[in-house]
Image (tube, rainbow, N blue to C red):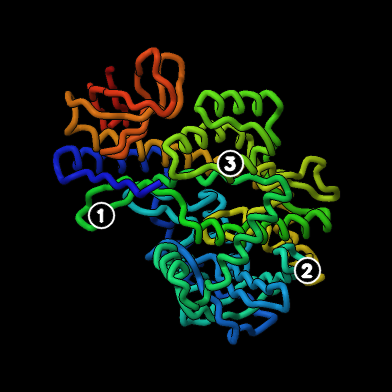
Amino acid sequence: MPQRRSHVAPSAAQTELAAALAALRRSLEAPMEFPPEVLAEAEAARAAEPDLDLRDVPFATLDPAGSRDLDQAFHLERDGSGYIVRYAIADVPGFVTPGGAVDTEARRRGQTLYAADGRIPLHPAVLSEDRASLLPGVDRPALVWTFSLDAEGAVSEFRLERALIRSRVQLDYASTQASLDRGEDGPASLLAEIGALRIDQERRRGGASLNLPDEEVARAEDGTYDIERASPLPVEEWNAQLSLMTGMAAASLMIDAGVGILRTMPRPDDDAFETFRHQTEALGRPWTSGDYGEYLRGLDRTDPLALPVLQAAAALFRGAGYVTFDGEAPRDAIQAAIAAPYAHATAPLRRLVDRWVLAICLAVSTGREIPSWARESLDQLPALMQESGQRASRLDAATVNAVEAALLVPLVGIEVDATVIELRGERASVQIADPAVTATAPVPADAKPGDVVRLRVIRADIANGEVEFAI
């Protein structure tokens, strides 16, 4: 799907939008600023002593352009017919004192929130954008996973160690994709090869990836707001496979040790699969053979009906949660979309639970005692992460709604074309191409997913994030 970008021009609507976004942040009790005691402790924090010096390994990072909170760095190399993958993760456990001010505030926040008018970070910037971030050209402590992969991309062995590293370059997705498309040599040269093999490993496990188009509200330099929608680049999917591989390794370490926290999701039941199958038939893209992961991977993302199919498939990816255990691994430890036990282990600068996972895995991998603080507070994490996840979802949805309403203010009383994505009784989820807005609207009785219908914009309420259409 090509990138779509809509722009809210400076106007009274823009002023109203800025006020609505600020009010939204206040309603969530999500302050951007940290209490003085948290800032003071973060400023005084010093990294844990590394066990290894890996500064001679030319690590690289790969993130959205302009990122400063760099959680991961990688180094890829051939090893005979296989590969060695080193995946360095920011050593947040080495900086945060358990029970201290930074820890307490991080537990209250749960995760970094991405608001249209600025990030609401999990940790103070001195850690998340400086000392703990894997920025290029500086020495940084890290927790380094080293994987041996065979010729088919399967993991034959792995380990986790605390090390000092130095990233050489900060890559971004768009320029890295362009470089790979040109066949240029660089730190990510093997990423397509290894990523493709890992995707095939996912297929063999029976896993599935939705890869829905990203929807992001961005603030321009002049203070106005944009909505950007684009399908993930291939390099993003290949990079995500390194993170998934690491999460599966973390899960296996904790399961073997009998203590930890997993990210789980139940497999869809037969009724959910049957409903989805009927939806694909109604869309003219029937799922007739193979498992659902194979079907989703085979969709042509340039097909206008691919988005409605993927939206329908989202109903299969529900019920994700966190499960803790100490003494015996849970019976149902599978994350169904990944088709394997899995743990969040690669974003400790931005997600609370990863710090526990990394601390436990490091102890298990190096034969040390699991930290008592991590073990004793495990049961608190599911509730903390659920609360922060709900806060993030409310913020994301309300932000998009407010910006979309602002985009439509100039079009009140005007007709627009919209593509039907999903029928919901007499109404439907529709996608307007210009401006790029997704909304619920009434549609003709004979409308089908994929049809283009003509709608009139009746109302656009920025403060409440509401829009109204008529046929």
Question: In the drawing, does residue 25 fall left or right of residue 77?
Answer: left
Q: Which amino acid does label 3 sit on?
A: Leu
Q: Which amino acid does label 1 sit on?
A: Ala
Is residue 256 something that shows in the picture?
yes
The residue to which callout 1 is attached is 220
The answer to whether the residue labelled 1 contacts the one labelled 3, judged by CB atoms less than 8 Å apart, is no
Q: Position of residue 214 (x, y in %)?
A: 43, 47
Q: Along the polypeptide, which appears first: circle 3 or circle 2?
A: 2
Question: In the drawing, does residue 87 fall left or right of residue 261?
Answer: left
Q: How far apart are marks 1 and 3 (CA)?
A: 35 Å
Q: Along the polypeptide, which appears first: circle 1 or circle 2?
A: 2
The answer to whether the residue labelled 3 contacts the one labelled 2, judged by CB atoms less than 8 Å apart, is no
Above/below status of 171 relative to 138: above
- In this view, the residue in front, 228 or 23, is 228
| SS for dot 3 | helix
The residue to which callout 3 is attached is 296
The residue to which callout 2 is attached is 157
Mark 3: few/some/many CA within 10 Å (<14, 14-19, 20+): some
Q: Which mark is nearer the camera, 3 or 2?
A: 3
Q: Where is residue 207 in the image (x, y as percent from the top left)?
A: 67, 46
